[in-house]
Structure formats: C-alpha cells, structure tokens
Amino acid sequence: MIERYQTPEMRALWSEARKYQVWAEVEILVMEAWESLGQVPIGTAQQLRQALQQKPLDASFARRVEEIEAETRHDIVAFTRALTEWVGSLEVARWLHLGLTSTDVVDTAQNLLLDEALGLIEQELDKVLAALKHLAVRYKHLPAVGRTHGVHAEPTSFGLRFLAFYAALLRDRERLNRAREGIRVAMISGSVGNYAHVEPAVEAWVAQKLGFQIEPASSQVVPRDRHAELMGALAILGADLERIAVELRHLQRTEVLEAQEPFSYKQTGSSSMPHKKNPVALENISGLARLLRSNLQAELENVALWHERDISHSSVERVILPDTTTLAHYMLRRLLRVLEGLVVFEENIQRNLERTRGLVYSQRVLSLLIEAGLDRTAAYEIVQRNALKSWAEGQDFRALLEADPACPLKGAALAQAFDPGYFLRHVDTIYARFGL
C-alpha cells in the first residue's frame, strides 16, 4: 500500500520484519510440539525464543532474507537460512522446519496477521458506530425532507439517516466477526496435507497455542474460500462506508447544504478557486471502496487452485490482503474524523423542508381527503391538480387547496396535513429497536 493511505498500525503489522517475527513464532511453536512428542531435545524451542528476545528480527534481518532469496528464489528457504545465521546456533537450527512445508508456516502466520488486522479494523469500526449513534440521537426529532430519486418526497427525521447507517455497520460488524472466526485456523499438515512427515498432534499444539482451530481438511494450503469470505466482508464494509459518504456528499452540495465535512482554517479546496470547500474526504472514501470491491474479485479467483496447490494465489495475496485491510482501517479512521467534525446546518434543513411550498405533504392531504369521504381517484385528482399548479406557478400548495372549491378540507382540518411532526410519530419506535 502506498504511504498516503497507510495507518501507522497497519504499516507496522504488514512490515516485512513483522511477517518474519510471526513466521518465527510458528516455527517455535512447531518445535515445542515436537519436544512434547520426544522428537526434539527439550529446551530447543526456548533457546530459539530467548535468542530472538535478545536480538529481535528487524529490518536488517528482512534485508538479509531478501539477499538470500535473490539466490534461492524461495522465501521460506531464505528465511530459515537467515534465521540460522541470526541465531548463530547450528544445534537449534537443526530442528527448524522439521516435517513442514512452506505453506504450513506461511498460511498459519498469515492467518495470525489477518486476525490481528481485523482486530484493528473492528476497534476503528466501533468508534465509527459510536459517532453514528451520537448523530442519530442528537438529530432524532429534527424534521428534514426525505428524498427519493433525488427528489423531495416527504418529511422524515434527519437523525434517522444516521440510525440506518448505524444499523448497516452493525451488520458489517457481525460479518467481520464471522469472517474473522473463519480465518482463525492453523494448518500444519505437510507437503500435500496428509501429515506424512508431521504428526496431527503438532498442528493441534500450534492451533491451541494461537487460540485457533485446526484446518480440518487442507491440501497444502488453507482453502481460499475462507479468505474470500473475509474479503467479501471487507468489500461490503467498504460499500457501506461509501453509502454514508455519498449521502453526506449530496448533503454538502451548494443547492442543499444541510451538512458539510469539517474544513480546517488553513485547508484549501481548490488551487484556482479560493472559495471552495469540497467533500474531499468523503470522495476519497468513495474511491477507495472501489479498490475493496476489485480486490474481492481477485480473491475469488484464488479459490480454485491446481490439485493440492499451486502458487497463483500467492502473488495476488501479497498485494490484496495487506492493501485491503489497510484501506479498510484508513477509510474508517477518515470517516470517523468527518463524523466527529460534521457541520449540520439546521436552518438549511428547515429551508429545504419548505422549499417546495408544502408539496411534501401531498400524501397526507390525500389520506385526509379519503378519510373525509372522497374516493381515492377523486381525492388523487384534487391533490395532483393543485400540486402540478404549485410546481408550474410557484404558488403555495396549501393556499391552492384552500381556494379549490372541490377540496372539502379547509382551515384547521387542512392545516393538520402540514404538520411535520405527524411524519415523525413512530421514530421512537424505530430507535427503540436499537435500545435508543
């Protein structure tokens, strides 16, 4: 991921040094398991662990792996040779990678990193959920015009928008939890997944130490439907973040201006037009959501591999797994700043509610006319005729109805149709579903 869209936490998590630290941890756990089975001298794993505590794997170690890999053309071989040099103990190195194939280490370690990455994402998601809840509650009873097809429809609660977003992200949280559980598996099953050179007890030991389940039927890789489910959950999360971004971008349009993303004093919106305040953070979120969706497609292509394995998935995942988790983390963090600093223009919300001169109350008028005894066709004709006249001539809809001799509703009976509070009377019921 380019630096522009990284977060410090994800940069550290997906660094080469961190990857090799996790690879080493898997190797140590395997060594411990062999010790418990009497195949490796007791204390060997502890010697390796202590050596790495005294001299942690760092960027210089990663560079050494890269140097060796330039010769071997094999990353795990380069890693084990570099680790032997780093530790400086041939007796310890003798038992490295015993009975394993490369993917035992790579896939198990990668799942551990993905689990950590999802933990970071969920922490940020919880902050966004809290911000949405705050906005939903704050604007719960603020009447605003609802829009369908981009056109004014009927009054609604301004806060209800944020509650709908809150509900969607709660579902995203559940999807991520399921996908995270699906990725929390260890695979230590050997060259074609049949434990020919490693005992199932070794896999069980490693899984237990990591707090993972075992992969019940592996080949030489963890089946990639697990990763596809994870990428799907992240892609849907991105789509929901874009949904929020698109709504707020529309609300920031000059003709609407009901809400605006925060704009700092020294910020500039345009190199040529000093007056500009553009929704750049929200547009950024919309753009990055496209990457999450396209990365899902790439992971779906990784599910079908040749026989027990090939490595066509490997090059793809070296890019899309760090990138997608990093982007999701970045997008959540950027949206959080928008939501916490969101500027809401209540006077503009009221102005927009009144902009169509009462037309947004047409369905309420229609209902009252039917209650007054008119059949639906006759009532609809009265309402539509006056509504179209209001559109065409810019006249007040309620005044036109008052003047229409065919409309039986007058005065207070008609006025009740134009009360925005009527449209919000069940809002508390909706909020109560979320304990709000």
Image (spheres, rainbow, N blue to C red):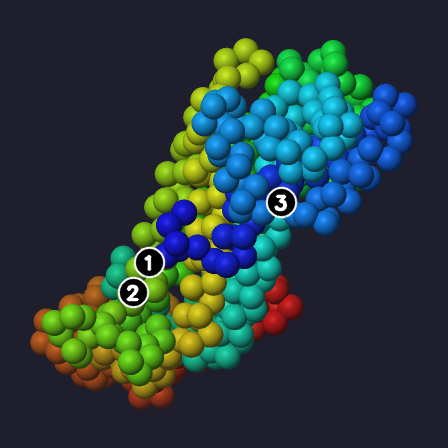
Kind of residue at badge 2: Val
Q: Tell me what residue is drawn at x 58 percent, y 13 percent.
A: 308
Percent x, y of residue 353: 30, 78
Give the crowd class for mark 3: few <14, some 14-19, many >=20 residues within 10 Å: many
Q: Residue furthest bottom?
A: 411
As rendered, which of 436 and 238 lies closer to the eye? Answer: 238
Which quadrant of the view contains residue 109?
A: top right
Kind of residue at badge 1: Asn
Up/down of 311 relative to 285, above or below: above
Q: Are marks 2 and 1 in contact (CB under 8 Å)?
A: yes
- Numbered disc total: 3
Q: Please state if 402 lies on the left or on the right of 422 as rendered.
A: left
Q: Which residue is mark 1?
A: 284
As rendered, which of 275 and 68 lies closer to the eye? Answer: 68
Label ID, residue 57: 3
Kind of residue at badge 3: Leu
Q: Tell me what residue is drawn at x 32 percent, y 86 percent.
A: 347
As rendered, which of 92 and 146 lies closer to the eye? Answer: 92
